[in-house]
Amino acid sequence: MVEVVSPGTENRSRDYCYKRTEYAARGITEYWIVDPELKQITVCKWVEGQYEDTVLKGTATIASDIVPDWKLIVEQVFAVAN
C-alpha cells in the first residue's frame, strides 16, 4: 500500500494519522507514506500490534518485507516527478 500525502494541513493530518487506523483495521502489514513536499518516504510496518515508522530521505534505500530482494532509493521516487 502506498499513500501519497495530499497538500494542505487537514490532508496531511489525515494521511499521517487517521489513515493509520484504517489500514490497521484492514490488516495492512506494511505501507508507505510518500511525502512530495518533504521529499521523504515513511515506511510503516506492523510489529506486535502497532506500526513502527522508519523515515527515509535522499539516498536511503527502501526495502520491503512484502517483496523480498526488492529495493528502491528514495531519490528515484521523487526524480520521476521532476
Image: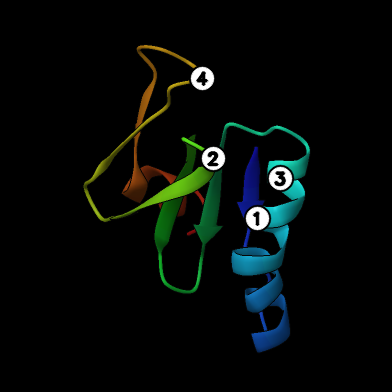
Q: Is residue 54 left or right of residue 9?
A: left
Q: Are marks 1 and 2 in contact (CB under 8 Å)?
A: no
The residue beneath circle 1 is 20
* 16 shown above or below 4: below
Question: Of helix, strand and loop, which one carries label 4?
Answer: loop
The residue beneath circle 3 is 23
The 10 Å Cα crowd at callout 4, few under 14, some 14 to 19, many 20 or more, is few
Give the spatial CA distance, label 4 vs label 2. 17 Å
Question: Residue 51 at what x, y percent from top left?
Answer: 50, 47
Which residue appears farthest toward the left when viewing the image?
59
- Which one is closest to the eye, mark 1 or mark 2? 2
Could you tell me which quadrant the N terminus lies in?
Answer: top right
Q: Amino acid at mark 1?
A: Arg
Q: Amino acid at mark 4?
A: Ile
Q: Is residue 25 left or right of residue 33?
A: right
The residue beneath circle 2 is 49
Which numbered marker is on residue 66? 4
The residue that appears at 65% across and 87% down in the rendered structure is 9
Give the spatial CA distance, label 1 vs label 2. 12 Å
Question: Of helix, strand and loop, which one carries label 3?
Answer: helix
Instruction: Give residue 49's quadrant in the image.
Output: top right
Which residue appears farthest toward the bottom when viewing the image?
9
* 21 shown above or below 70: below
The 10 Å Cα crowd at callout 3, few under 14, some 14 to 19, many 20 or more, is some
